[in-house]
Amino acid sequence: MPKILIAECKQEVSTFNPHLSGYDDFGIRRGEELLGYHRTVRNEIGGALSVFDADREVEVVPAYSAFFITSGGTLARPDWERIASEFLDGIRAAPPVDGVYFCMHGAMASEEELDPEGWLLEETRKILGRDIPIVVSLDLHGILTDRMVEQSDAIVAYHTYPHVDFFETGQRSARLLLRILSGEVRPVTAKVAIPALVRGDELITATGLFGQSIRMAQEIEQSPKGLSAGMFIGNPFTDVPELQTYSFVVTDNDPLLAEHGALRLAESFWANHEAMRVPLVSLEEMVRIALDTTGGTLGLVDAADATSSGASGDSNALLKALLGAGYSGRTLVPIVDAAAVRQAFAAGIGGVISTTIGGTLDPDRFTPLPVAAPVRLLADGRFRSESFGEEWLAGPTAVLEVENFTIVAASHAVNLYDRSYFLAHGQNPANFDAVVIKSPHCQPHMYAAWCRRMVNVDAPGSSSANLPYLGHTRCPRPIFPLDAEVSFEPRAKHFPHHP
């Protein structure tokens, strides 16, 4: 009966967000609590468990899970050290196992350790030895470092953006691990580094040019000797030494086939990379569009403050511009401002507070905006994502009205890649003339399919799609689009199967 250890350490950060992440930004689960929670949600571990639970020969050994409540800024050193220590303690405390499934993101970074996932894998190898197979699932926005590939037996990545295959990625990982354990396959990996940081609608895998590379990867993965294949476009806001795009292919003991596949993927991606940018409109142009638009809901995309990409969530840039222009449409705005929420709770529902909103976490980019606001709703900020059932914890949350603007203010940032934050607090975006969407892409039915127009705004923020604005200092150079005339000579790097 094979024993399989399961552990998770998952966060996506923007190193341009000055507000450091901490231990309290994670949901920590151990043992049976880890299994009980993940069997209720359609995420990667949930998918892996669906495969393991269906095999009566498999015994699952839950170790440790640190799952980000939201993305955020660089993880503070003492908090990273605590999570790392607890993670490895969970590995040490486990009984002897035959294999390991790790669920990770790939775009974590702490103040000193810029490859936390690779470090955890390396330390796990020291504990378990080289003979225990390790399969790791990662977000395609991860940064596929050499150490991550060297210290694992196989990598499995999402194939969709917006992400709808969390569960399926876990299933693919679990099935591959079982094949390795049975001796059926011996993985070898090749990867190719591509000097590009990309954004934009062409990354939508169902409709964009990036989907061509993903479908090629799926064909490779489903071929007779293919085990796993995909693309890592990185998180452009996680400025670390290996940040760029990567193709990778894992085959059954066929390094030449892996190399050929990884090169084909890289070349298909590079052929389209220049189209992978976002046409942005200025704040002034956004205001003009808003004033000229009538009927339906206007989607104002503030991806520069996308909490799911690691931004702070406290941007009031769009709110300030619309207020200043006298825009009269009913507008729904998400914002993080713990101090304003505390005042709202003190005043109670129906009370009116004089406060400032925004600019509390990233003060160099955002200035607090003075407002007078009636308090319309108070809540504990605990709710489930409408997409996959994950539990989000926004902390105490208040719905405030500032003239024609309805502000849902949270104490802590949560992911905003669906509408659950609004809906959980009584606000249906479809009932507004405009809604500020702090996510670069959501599933189409969330907004794009029914909004009258989607406007991508060039606002300040630590996850701006205007990448040259951010000021990268660590990633490889030259790189598109930070530098002019970037050349690409594809070279594959090989990673053999562990004995």
Image (tube, grey):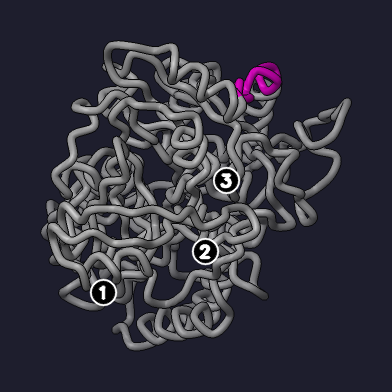
**Residue found 76% across the figure and 37% down from its top:** 195
**Lower position in the chain sequence, tag 2 or tag 1:** 1
Q: Nearer the viewer, residue 58 or 403?
A: 403
State the mark number for residue 463.
3
Highlighted range, magenta: 271-281
Q: Position of residue 43 (x, y in %)?
A: 27, 49
Residue type at mark 3? Answer: Ser
Secondary structure type for disc 2: loop
- Classify residue 313 as left or right of residue 376: right
Read off the residue under disc 2.
361
Q: Position of residue 167 (x, y in %)?
A: 26, 44
**274 part of magenta stretch:** yes
Residue type at mark 2? Answer: Leu
- Classify residue 27 as left or right of residue 272: left
Q: Foreground mark, 2 or 1? A: 2
**475 part of magenta stretch:** no
Q: Position of residue 252 (x, y in %)?
A: 50, 41
Q: How far apart are the alpha carbons under marks 2 and 3?
A: 14 Å
Quadrant the C terminus occupies: bottom right
In this rendering, the answer to whether 494 lies above or below 13 is above
Q: Position of residue 51 (x, y in %)?
A: 20, 50
Secondary structure type for disc 3: loop
